[in-house]
């Protein structure tokens, strides 16, 4: 996703360092994993009489359980509902988890996956007006991690 954002040299190095700190830490456990959607955007979830996920072509196994929720949280926070996003994301995360311990664990890891979500959005040409804000949010999320 960094290649697709075509970041200038010094900014690219900063993101490499921040992403690497997360990736090589014990916080993003490479051994845990589950099947994920792989493209967790609001348009791939239908709500009505239940919640339905569609468009599974990007799905994969053995991924971090909070990855999709982190990508989706970035999408929600980058939407026009930004002012209400944090409360909604917290509520969604609480109901996603099976208890307090899992909630703490996933809340700790969420910034990494939200950063990936912001970087995914920042590469889109139709979101160019928001690019600087998205990159700042991604960097802030990554800076909240292990160093």
Image: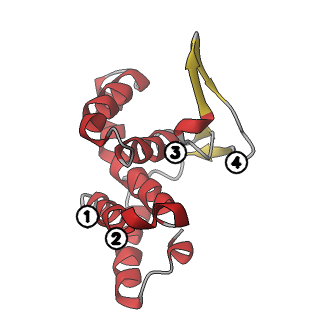
* Disc 2 versus disc 4: nearer the observer: 4
Local crowd at mark 4 within 10 Å, few (<14), some, or many (≥20)?
A: few
| Residue lying farthest to the right in this orientation | 57
Q: Callout 1: helix, strand or loop?
A: helix
The tag earlier along the polypeptide, 1 or 4, is 4
Relative image position of residue 80 (x, y in whole percent): 36, 42
Q: Residue at x 38, y 21 (%)?
A: 95
Residue at mark 3: 64
Q: Are marks 1 and 4 in contact (CB under 8 Å)?
A: no
Relative image position of residue 120 (x, y in whole percent): 51, 60
Pick whichever, 128 or 14, lies toward us. 128
Q: Residue at x 24, y 58 (%)?
A: 144
The numbered dot on residue 143 is: 1
Residue at mark 4: 58
Quarter of the image containing the C terminus? bottom left
The numbered dot on residue 127 is: none
Q: Are marks 3 and 2 in contact (CB under 8 Å)?
A: no
Q: Callout 2: helix, strand or loop?
A: helix
Residue at mark 2: 18
Q: Residue at x 45, y 67 (%)?
A: 128
Q: Are marks 1 and 2 in contact (CB under 8 Å)?
A: yes
* Disc 3 versus disc 1: nearer the observer: 1
Residue 124 visible in the shown view: no
Local crowd at mark 2 within 10 Å, few (<14), some, or many (≥20)?
A: many
The tag earlier along the polypeptide, 2 or 4, is 2
How far, Cα to Cα, is label 1 from label 2? Answer: 7 Å
The tag earlier along the polypeptide, 3 or 2, is 2
The tag earlier along the polypeptide, 3 or 1, is 3
């Amino acid at each position: 996703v960094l290649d697709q954002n075509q970041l200038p040299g010094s900014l690219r190095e900063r993101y490499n360092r921040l992403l690497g700190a997360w990736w090589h830490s014990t916080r993003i456990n490479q051994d845990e994993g589950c099947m994920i959607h792989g493209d967790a955007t609001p348009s791939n979830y239908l709500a009505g009489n239940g919640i339905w996920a569609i468009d599974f072509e990007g799905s994969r196994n053995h991924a971090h359980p909070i990855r999709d929720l982190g990508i989706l949280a970035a999408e929600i926070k980058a939407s026009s509902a930004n002012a209400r996003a944090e409360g909604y994301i917290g509520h969604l995360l609480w109901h996603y988890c099976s208890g307090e311990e899992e909630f703490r664990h996933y809340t700790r890891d969420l910034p990494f996956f939200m950063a990936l979500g912001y970087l995914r959005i920042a590469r889109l040409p139709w979101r160019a007006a928001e690019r600087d804000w998205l990159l700042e949010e991604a960097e802030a999320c990554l800076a909240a991690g292990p160093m």
